[in-house]
């Protein structure tokens, strides 16, 4: 089937490409068939922590209120259940500890320039959309920062894949501020650390090429074949109720 009609109307983002790479069927059900999405507790916990960091960095809340707001909002936002009770407890406690001990600064930054900035742009004629968690200025220059709810990286490759997102954001940051960032930061709030990568134009160009190749590849895809992974299909996939590979499938 030719999906050009739907694909032409799309703005492309790192998450859309990642969705396709994770499972082409998930991309098809989400973006082409537009099936209803189902949430999961991991993502909801990430959204809660993201939203508190966003409010703090955009000066909507005070530092000393963060832990209280986390406790207050937890049950309103994390409405799904974690797959195992001990995970529920561990995530809840980890978030609370993070906001109780957060000192208000990620890593010596001097100025906050952008918070949750949604932008649209084009890359070689391809429409692009993105949401940048934070752009900061520290004594060495600009920093593009992404809050990450995941724990330790599984491998160097996994970390490299996530850096693609920050490199794509760097193009827009350069357009807006007229300078390239000096650093790409992951605020890994579950681990309680900042993971820093120096910005490299070579890596950025490789990631732009990857992005454009991926869009092209999706255009050429005729069959969006499922790539099942048991844990992901049963607990994380947002269209799991519409796919027979998940225990949540509603026939
Ligand atoms: S349930 Fe699994 S196989 Fe089905 S769409 Fe989701 S990720 Fe793909």
Image: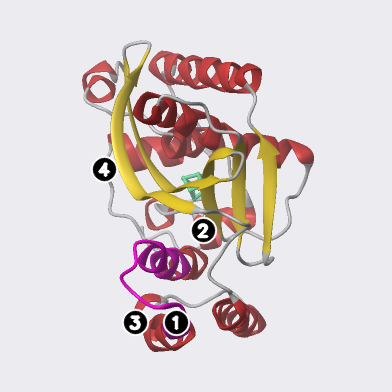
Cα gap from disc 4 to disc 2, whole angstroms: 17 Å
Q: Which mark is residue 116?
A: none
The answer to which of 182 and 154 lies nearer the viewer is 182
Label 1, residues with CA under 10 Å away: few <14, some 14-19, many ≥20:
many
Cα gap from disc 2 to disc 3, whole angstroms: 20 Å
* Residue depth check, mark 2 versus mark 3: number of the one nearer the observer: 3
Q: How is the protein colored in the picture?
A: secondary structure
The dominant secondary structure in magenta is helix
Taking the view exactly as shown, the residue that stands out farthest to the front is 139
Q: Is residue 78 magenta?
A: no
SS of the residue under disc 2: helix
Task: Name the residue at 60% across, 45% down.
Answer: 139
Residue 241 lies, with reference to residue 229, above or below; the image says: below
Cα gap from disc 3 to disc 4, whole angstroms: 26 Å
Label 3, residues with CA under 10 Å away: few <14, some 14-19, many ≥20:
few
Residue at the disc numbered 2: 236
Residue at the disc numbered 4: 34
* Residue depth check, mark 1 versus mark 3: number of the one nearer the observer: 1
Cα gap from disc 2 to disc 1, whole angstroms: 23 Å
* Residue depth check, mark 1 versus mark 4: number of the one nearer the observer: 1
Residue at the disc numbered 1: 70
Image quarter (top left, top right, bottom left or bottom right) of the C terminus: bottom left
In this rendering, position of residue 166 left or right of residue 39? right
Magenta residue span:
49-66
Q: Position of residue 94 (x, y in %)?
A: 63, 78
Image quarter (top left, top right, bottom left or bottom right) of the N terminus: top left
Q: Position of residue 29 (x, y in %)?
A: 35, 41
Q: Position of residue 111 (x, y in %)?
A: 46, 52
Q: Is residue 55 magenta?
A: yes
Task: Name the residue at 54% across, 42% down.
Answer: 143
């Amino acid at each position: 089937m030719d999906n050009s009609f739907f694909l032409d109307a799309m703005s492309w983002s790192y998450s859309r490409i990642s969705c396709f790479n994770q499972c082409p069927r998930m991309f098809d059900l989400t973006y082409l068939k537009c099936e209803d999405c189902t949430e999961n507790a991991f993502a909801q916990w990430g959204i809660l922590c993201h939203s508190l960091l966003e409010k703090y960095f955009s000066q909507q809340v005070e530092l000393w209120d963060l832990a209280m707001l986390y406790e207050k909002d937890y049950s309103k936002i994390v409405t799904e259940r974690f797959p195992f009770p001990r995970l529920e407890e561990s995530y809840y406690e980890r978030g609370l500890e993070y906001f109780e001990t957060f000192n208000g600064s990620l890593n010596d930054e001097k100025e906050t320039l952008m918070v949750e900035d949604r932008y649209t742009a084009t890359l070689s004629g391809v429409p692009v959309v993105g949401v940048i968690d934070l752009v900061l200025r520290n004594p060495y220059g600009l920093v593009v920062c992404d809050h990450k709810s995941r724990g330790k990286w599984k491998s160097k490759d996994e970390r490299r894949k996530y850096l693609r997102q920050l490199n794509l954001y760097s193009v827009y940051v350069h357009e807006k501020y007229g300078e390239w960032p000096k650093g790409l930061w992951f605020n890994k709030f579950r681990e309680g650390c900042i993971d820093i990568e120096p910005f490299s134009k070579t890596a950025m160009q490789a990631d732009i090429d990857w992005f454009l190749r991926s869009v092209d590849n999706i255009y050429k895809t005729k069959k969006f074949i499922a790539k099942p992974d048991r844990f992901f299909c049963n607990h994380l996939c947002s269209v799991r109720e519409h796919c027979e590979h998940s225990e949540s499938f509603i026939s």
